[in-house]
Amino acid sequence: MATVREGNQTALLVVDVQVGVMAECWDAPRVIGNVSRVVDKARAAAVPVLWVQHSDHNLASDSAPWQWVSELAPGSSERVIDKHFNSSFEQTMLEEALAQLGASHIVLAGAMTNWCIRATAYGALERGYDVTLVEDAHTTDTMTLDDGTKIEAASVIHDLNIAMRWLSYPGRKNGVTKAQALVFTPPLRA
């Protein structure tokens, strides 16, 4: 566990797996299935699951696109964190929720890789958390730039998976794992 952050628990953070976000994402059905698999594993191991739900001028709260995809839903005791910026930490209650859980390790899944997943992963590391990115449980869409250049979603996903293997922060651990290989250990009891 992180040596710069108090706590010794793991928490799963599911970011923006919402109808309007996932609608254009690459390989969304497979990724949603992998997110669901990871949620099931966390719940089976009594690892807390926190859900981050984005809203802004393009994704209005309570609208149909703002809702969770039909395959996923927070459990009645699972915390939902509202966010309005890319990082799940910026102007949200996430750090407080993690502190209440004693969490120092975040397992991360969701959308969109190049925006909210990257910003949340880096934000977590910068705040002293250990981070494990579920490499096949995050996605994004292909971008076409103003000059016509296309940045393929698969390349963006691959890039972040590589970065999370090689980033180095003092006193923190980061890495990637596949959904199928992910093993949650039961939370330690104080």
Image (tube, rainbow, N blue to C red):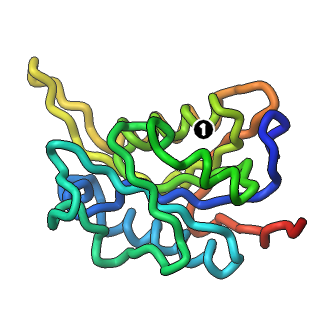
Callout 1 amino acid: Ala
Question: Would you say 180 lies left or right of 16 here?
Answer: right
Q: Is residue 89 visible?
A: yes
Question: Would you say 186 lies left or right of 67 here?
Answer: right
> Residue at position x 54%, y 52% from top?
108
Instruction: Return the x and y of residue 157 as percentages of the image width and height.
Output: 41, 42
Nearer to us in this view, 56 or 138: 56
Instruction: Return the x and y of residue 140 as percentages of the image width and height.
Output: 31, 47
> Residue at position x 55%, y 55% from top?
134
Q: Is residue 110 visible?
A: no
Q: Secondary structure at mark 1?
A: helix
Instruction: Return the x and y of residue 132 as percentages of the image width and height.
Output: 63, 49
Nearer to us in this view, 85 or 117: 85
Question: Would you say 110 lies left or right of 65 here?
Answer: right
Question: Would you say 177 lies left or right of 13 here?
Answer: right
Residue 102 in which image quadrant: bottom right
> Residue at position x 51%, y 65% from top?
79
Residue that carries the numbered disc 1 in the rendered image: 124
80 versus 169 height, above or below: below
Name of the residue lying farthest toward the right:
190
171 versus 176 height, above or below: above
Instruction: Return the x and y of residue 143 as percentages of the image width and height.
Output: 20, 35
Residue 12 in which image quadrant: bottom right
